[in-house]
Image (cartoon, rainbow, N blue to C red):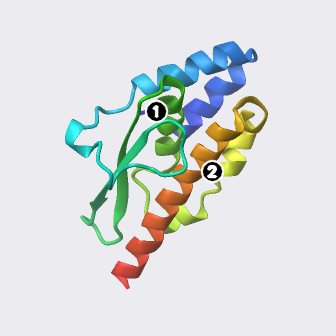
Amino acid sequence: MTAIDEIRDNFELLEDWDDRYRYVIELGRTLEPMPEAEHSAENKVNGCVSQVWLQKLVDRGNGAPLLKYRGDSDAHIVRGLVAIVLALYSGRTPQEILATDAISVFDEFGFRDHLTPQRSNGLRSMVERIKTDAKEALAEAS
């Protein structure tokens, strides 16, 4: 999976939106495969036009839990957007997740102007799902 800083640097290099779309699709191809059994109703993200699944894995190894995710979509561009969301949030503590403003990152990348409203809503739904997971993890830890 690609780090968010690397994605940010690559976006800055690509001025043409056709190239940026191709890059987003390429990011989707880097996602770790999600087992077919995890394409379940429990992992499905509501509010997305395309089908999107996020599988939460909690690592309680060293103190604070880390939330790790696998994700998938039936649409190539959305799969790339999932990869960007996971680059922002996967492997982070609940506190880090809650402190990260994904919408400002998406705006920085120009998604507000270049994604359909349905895709933008889907992005927000993914972020809300992960933030809800973070809140639940914090509640369980206390």
Q: In this view, does 116 lie above or below 46?
A: above
Q: Quadrant of the C terminus?
A: bottom left
Q: What residue type is labelled 1?
A: Thr
Residue 28: give its label: none
Give the residue displayed 64% in from the left and 46% down from the top. 121
SS class of the residue under badge 1?
Answer: loop
Q: Mark 1 points at which residue?
A: 2
Q: Would you say the residues marked 1 and 2 are in contact, meaning their CB atoms lie under 8 Å apart?
A: no
Q: Is residue 59 above or below residue 110?
A: below
SS class of the residue under badge 2?
Answer: helix
Residue 116 drawn at (x, y percent): 70, 33
Lower sequence index among marks 1 and 2: 1
**In the displayed image of the protein, which residue is found farthest to the right?**
113
Residue 102: give its label: 2
Give the residue displayed 45% in from the left and 27% down from the top. 28
Q: For this view, does 27 lie left or right of residue 104?
A: left
Residue 141 drawn at (x, y percent): 35, 80
Relative depth, front residue between 64 and 24: 24
Residue 104 drawn at (x, y percent): 72, 49
